[in-house]
Amino acid sequence: MVLTMIELKTQIPGPKSLALMERRKKAVARGPFHTTPIFAEKAEGSWITDVDGNKLLDFSSGIGVVNVGHSPQNVVKAAKNQLDKFIHTSFNVVAYENYISVCEKLNSATPGTFSKKSFLVNSGAEAVENAVKIARAYTGRQAVVCFQHAYHGRTYMAMSLTAKAKPYKYGFAPFNSEVYRSPFPYPYRWPTTSQPDKVAEECFLEFKNLVNSEIGVSQVAAVIIEPVLGEGGFVPAPKNFLSLLRNFCDENKIVLIFDEVQCGFGRTGTLFACEQMGVTPDLLVSAKGIAAGLPLSAVTGKSEIMDAPPEGGIGGTYCGNPVACSAALAVFDEWEKGTIQKNTQSIKRILQEKTESWFKNFPIVGDVRGLGPMRAIELVKDRNTKEPYPEAVKKIIKSAYEKGLILMSAGTFSNVIRFLPPLCTTEKDILIGLEIVEKAISEV
Ligand SMILES: Cc1ncc(COP(=O)(O)O)c(C=O)c1O
């Protein structure tokens, strides 16, 4: 393979980024992490130009947000049009049409033929919080079952539902009560078998045991799961696990919530991942890709469940901001054109072929997996022990950005590299990015 270099103007980070990082250290709290040491000047399509004039290829999409690309023309135009009209009235004070239009779009685009309603908020975590509130209001029950390796956000309920302690939970206890955690069907790390159907069956037995022995089924308000783990390492839940959960929730009048904040809005090649899994949740949480980077998120689900909270029971000052709603409608327009879907097929094909070839050639690549173009590699020190290799991931990410490619890690053990290119990325650019990764893996 011939390495196609990305031409950079300076070393990464360049002098302007270095100076900004010094200012950042003095002025900004330590908490927010940085995957790269650069600062953005502008971004278009799949490329981000930093303040030193370096153009970097983005395989992160701002953590799976700009699925339709950075600053697509129609989204920018729609947001500008709305800015010219009004920026904010609060939907709770003086309502506006584009909020309703986004809800109508969501109600018809999400799986399920039943009557649906939606509710808009600002972030993934806030949507998760509200999904739990709605489920509790509907069932009159308290317990929520979540899963190992889950990530649902950083606010208190979302953090309580999140699995990974460091850095997300450590030092922030106490967490919310009535949260119970069951194993996630993670075939690569399942102790008895890696056959997805078997893993699903065994994992479901553990779930049932947990519910029966530690909670009592009549106390469970909701089960919340990511159909494909996001931060947890891009592990798709086996389809039959989701259908076993679906049947269990139906039999026991439990609200099944799918958190599609990361795997939704086209990331897996269909608008929602659960479309490919043949299982429909009662409530679906979306965010990230919904408005191409403007803060917006949603809970969509069965009308009778969504209507459980009384008037005034859910809401917020900024919920469903009109500029974000206009952007979301433009994202729906992009999706309805069908061009992104076609592109996701070639992204998926190339990513799958490449990652599978790495699995053959590099012993540190222990697992390759994903759903559609949402793909990842898991690095291990030893294929037999499966000991995680987070140091290698760190090196590869650093080597990649130094060569002009922005990559992100994932996984409970920080040993996963996830590929999150904007879904408009061309075949040529995907190949350029993957050549950089391949070189970096071979150097570890
Ligand atoms: C599956 C999932 N749920 C919830 C969240 C939280 O979203 P936000 O960061 O917008 O609060 C994330 C963020 O990465 C996510 O991946």
Image (cartoon, rainbow, N blue to C red):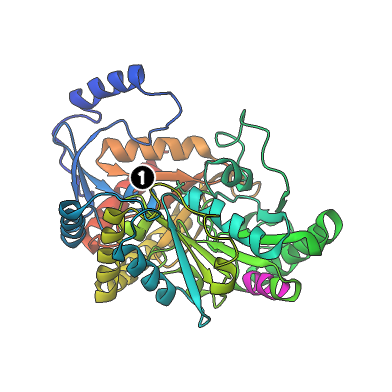
- Asked whether residue 68 appears in the rendered view, the answer is no
Quarter of the rendering containing residue 354: bottom left
Q: Mark 1: give few (<14), some (14-19) or many (20+) Cα within 10 Å.
A: many
Looking at the image, the residue that sits furthest to the bottom is 113
Relative horizontal placement of residue 181, taking residue 296 as reference (left or right): right
Relative horizontal placement of residue 134, taking residue 316 as reference (left or right): right
Relative horizontal placement of residue 425, taking residue 288 as reference (left or right): left
Q: Position of residue 426 (x, y in %)?
A: 22, 62
Q: Residue at x 66, y 58 (%)?
A: 136
Q: Position of residue 148 (x, y in %)?
A: 65, 51
Q: Quadrant of the C terminus?
A: top left
Taking depth in this image into account, of 86 and 59 the one nearest to the observer is 86
392 w.r.t. 269: above or below: above
Q: Residue at x 65, y 66 (%)?
A: 255
Residue under circle 1? 407
Magenta residues? 240-248
Q: Residue at x 62, y 70 (%)?
A: 242
Q: Quadrant of the N terminus?
A: bottom left
* Main secondary structure along the magenta-highlighted residues: helix
- Asked whether residue 249 appears in the rendered view, the answer is yes
Q: Position of residue 141 (x, y in %)?
A: 73, 59
Q: Is residue 241 magenta?
A: yes
Tally of numbered discs: 1
Q: Position of residue 397 (x, y in %)?
A: 38, 39
Relative horizontal placement of residue 362, taking residue 177 as reference (left or right): left
Quarter of the rendering containing residue 253: bottom right
Taking depth in this image into account, of 300 and 239 the one nearest to the observer is 300
